[in-house]
Image (cartoon, rainbow, N blue to C red):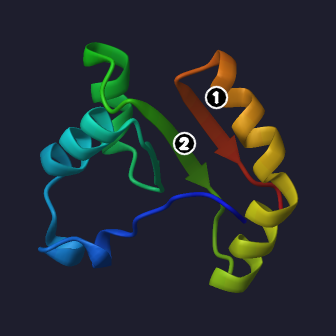
Amino acid sequence: MGQDAIHTRDLPLGNRTKDSEIIRISLQEGRVVVTKDADFVETIVLKSQPWKLLLVSAGNITNSELESLFTANLDKIAKGFVEFDFINWIVQT
């Protein structure tokens, strides 16, 4: 959809990449961290890190359902990040 995205599996350590490295990349490259991991909430609130954070709470849904939700809501999410550094997206299924 025209977004420049990197998945952790594409990083040298893949899904074993430490949160601190993900935060470093986010700050250095101006990237939004998209995660279901609430550990990042503490760092965004206390240290304003990562650069921007999208916390996704979607319950038990398939990857294709999640992809469809992102497709349908990407414009709203992007507009939200114009004003906010942290979005807690609770998906109602």
Residue 46 lies, with reference to residue 7, above or below; the image says above
- Name the residue rendered at 24%, 50% in the picture: 22
13 vs 9, left or right, is: left
Q: Residues within 10 Å of mark 2 (few under 14, many from 20)?
A: many
Cα separation, mark 1 vs mark 2, equals 9 Å
* Residue 47 in picture, x, y percent from top left: 25, 16
* Residue 84 in picture, x, y percent from top left: 61, 20
Residue 83 lies, with reference to residue 22, above or below; the image says above
For disc 1, the marked residue is 81
User: Camera-side residue: 75 or 15?
Assistant: 75
36 vs 93, left or right, is: left
Of labels 1 and 2, the one closer to you: 1
Q: Assign a secondary structure to mark 1.
A: helix
Quadrant location of residue 58?
A: bottom right
- Name the residue rendered at 39%, 35% in the picture: 30
Of the 4 image quadrants, the one containing the N terminus is bottom right
Determine whether label 1 and label 2 are within 8 Å by CB. Answer: yes
- Name the residue rendered at 22%, 71% in the picture: 11
Mark number, residue 17: none
For disc 2, the marked residue is 54
Given the image, on which type of amino acid does mark 2 rest? Leu
- Name the residue rendered at 76%, 78% in the picture: 65
Q: Assign a secondary structure to mark 2.
A: strand
* Residue 6 in picture, x, y percent from top left: 40, 65
61 vs 25, left or right, is: right
Residue 46 lies, with reference to residue 87, above or below; the image says above
User: Camera-side residue: 21 or 92?
Assistant: 21
Of the 4 image quadrants, the one containing the C terminus is bottom right
